[in-house]
Image (cartoon, rainbow, N blue to C red):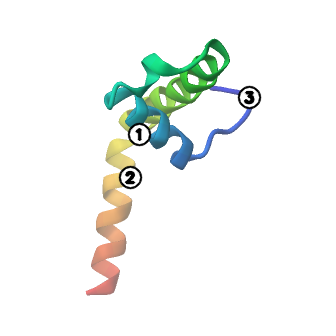
């Protein structure tokens, strides 16, 4: 996990830029910054994958409380 936290909004922005192909126009520093945010997005996805069952159970329980 990265020492510095990267917000979900920044992770989403980095992935969006990559998907749209905007990363090819970045200078070296900007690419490094984006790659750090992409790495954070990867770690977030790995964490979500490891905890998927727990998260789904929690959300289901919360939804059950509202009904």
- How far across and down, in percent of the image, does residue 9 sit? 52, 49
Query: Circle 2 — which element?
Result: helix
Query: Circle 3 — which element?
Result: loop
Going from the N terminus, do you reach mark 3 or mark 1 first? 3
- How far across and down, in percent of the image, does residue 67 sit? 25, 87
Q: Nearer the viewer, mark 2 or mark 1?
A: 1
Instruction: Indicate left or right for 42 with 28 as reference.
Output: left
Q: Are marks 3 and 1 in contact (CB under 8 Å)?
A: no
**Disc 2 to disc 3, C-alpha distance:** 24 Å
Depth check, front residue: 34 or 20: 20
Q: Are marks 2 and 1 in contact (CB under 8 Å)?
A: yes
**Disc 2 to disc 1, C-alpha distance:** 8 Å
Label at residue 55: 2
- How far across and down, in percent of the image, does residue 46 sit? 43, 29
Q: Which residue bears the numbered disc 1?
A: 48
Label at residue 3: 3
Residue 50, quarter of the rendered image: top left
Q: Residue at x 48, y 20 (%)?
A: 25
Q: Residue furthest front?
A: 25
Q: Residue furthest right?
A: 3
Q: Residue at x 32, y 46 (%)?
A: 53
């Amino acid at each position: 996990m990265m020492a510095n936290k990267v917000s979900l909004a920044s992770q989403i922005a980095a992935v969006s830029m990559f998907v749209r192909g905007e990363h090819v126009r970045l200078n070296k520093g900007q690419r490094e910054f984006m790659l750090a945010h992409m790495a954070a997005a990867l770690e977030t996805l790995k964490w979500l994958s490891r905890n998927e069952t727990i998260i789904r159970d929690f959300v289901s329980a919360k939804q059950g409380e509202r009904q």
